[in-house]
Amino acid sequence: MNTITPSKLEKILAEGHFAVTSECGPPRGANGEVVEEKANLIKDHVDAINVTDNQTSVVRLCSLASCIRIKQMGLEPVLQMVTRDRNRIGIQSDILGAASFGINNILCLTGDHQHFGDHPQAVNVFDLDSTQLIQTVKLMRDEGKLLGGFEMKERPKMFIGAAANPFADPFEIRVARLSKKVAAGCQFIQTQCIYNMEKFKLWMQQVRDQGLHEKVAIFAGLTPMKNVGMAKYMKNRVPGIDVPDYIVERLAAVPKEKQADEGIKICVEQIQELKEEEGIRGFHIMAIEWEEKVPEIVEMAGLYPRPKINEN
Amino acid sequence: MIMAKPKPIEEIINEIKDFNKVLIAGCDGCVTVCEAGGSKEVQVLASALRLFFTKESKRIEIDETSLTRQCDKDYLRELLDKIDNYDAVVSLACGAGVQFMAEMYRNKPIFPGVDTCFIGVTEERGVWTERCQACGQCILARTGGICPIARCSKRMLNGPCGGSEKGKCEVSPETDCGWHLIYERLKELGQLDYFSKPADPKDWVSSRDGGPRKIVREDVRL
């Protein structure tokens, strides 16, 4: 398979391997070493590291600076970018800045509404939405143009990703919306964290029915549960997340000190099951403030060692 | 129609408490329909203010009037003869009316008596909801007659986001997801083609981002 960017992630997929990504959330302060510590915990077990962009609208050290740090450690960052906080001028400028440091992966997101964050009084920008951000990056990369029409000498070579939530209502919109992102130029998808496997497989079936799995690499998103409290919180309080009762019950059935292990076990079983699902090309493991568990999950799921890629 | 809501009376008292003669000026346009600034609300506010200042043993004279429209010079001129009898005016018109009155009567402080909220509709008596953000370039033809800019909390043009649940917005379970409504309506109309095509980045120049807006139409100028 041909690749069109220098992205290591794109190469791994092109060679037919399952890709493994994880994420690290930057700190709510100026200590960039936190990012490096988190990256060090997972670097040998993942192919690329997403850095969240002020996730849940809480102000954090910026994704771009964190990605530069990760790149300078010799690792592969995925720049998450939301359209909530910057207009098309700021966004394109940051994309060029990222490209200038050899950052070759971007995840295009609209972003959570600021209502949920630590600055609910803020103006939101939303000059573009996630689909339009995909279009923008593609225009910059493939046509060498900015949205304003200016032709650049040096293009940003981004492998373009986006998110998809197979569980939001109404279910029938979800594949149509994915199709729109693919039409806009999206090359890989990291899904919302999956707990309801039946519903996810139904979504994948619809994805395959439309042939979308051949146009976009789908990474199953997984977040291990730390305990039954987290499962209940995710079930009842987090919009767009579908946690079936049997997950909550399974965690509740083991003693408190064993619940973390059970959560890991569920996650590993999910990966093993999803490896068999046609169209799944990778796994995105979002161990929220639990990055140290990622190596264990990757190893138990039989995804270790990670493939070595010739960088040339 | 422009929707407004009455300002808290404490805020108005605070603005006018040091004057001797104050005129409360309503507007018979939009703010009458949304029961925030018409002649009825002028009466209610004036009575409440008189009661308050009487109790405080303050002598402030408060008069009432209402104009056909405060966004129109011809009607604003109706105050020419009497404006000098007052130290200040509380206008219950929308923000446009307050400003137009201030432009005409430059030596009078004009205070807003309502908070201007949005362009919307009367859902039922006492319930008003937003429908339009006056972006200056209507896209309703492609969105099933439902505006994503006014109805989506993220004003997405390729929605819905992943946070909508049971047709409700992630920001509030009381708010319909605009894109859910759009999708359902396009489906009813057999126009899902409009949904399947990615909408390009919007030109916001015609919205507030281009600076204060102006329409000049030679065909209707005198």
Image (cartoon, coloured by chain):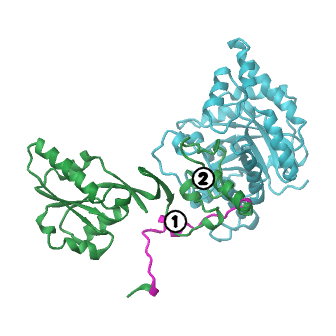
Query: Is A249 rendered above or below residue A66?
Result: above
Q: Which residue is mark 2?
A: B178
Dot 1 amino acid type: Cys
For label 1, count other residues whose C-alpha is less than 10 Å away and answer few (under 14), some (14-19) or many (20+). some
Which is nearer the eye, A1 or A110?
A110
In the image, residue B174 sits, relative to residue B215, either above or below, namely above
Residue B73 in view, yes or no: yes
The answer to whether one can see residue A11 in this image is: no
What predominant SS class does the magenta segment belong to? Answer: loop
Could you say which chain is coloured cyan in the image? Answer: A
Mark 2 or mark 1, which is nearer to you? 2
Letter of the chain shown green in the rendering = B
Whole-percent x and y of residue A6? Answer: 80, 53
Secondary structure of residue under mark 2: helix
Indicate the position of residue A20 as horizontal and vertical percent values.
Answer: 80, 38
For this view, does B61 lie left or right of residue A181?
left
Question: Where residue B77 sits: x, y (%)?
Answer: 23, 74
| Residue at x 67% of width, y 25% of height | A231
Q: Earlier in the sequence, mark 2 or mark 1?
A: 1
Specify the segment rendered in magenta. Answer: B195-219
| Residue carrying label 1 | B135
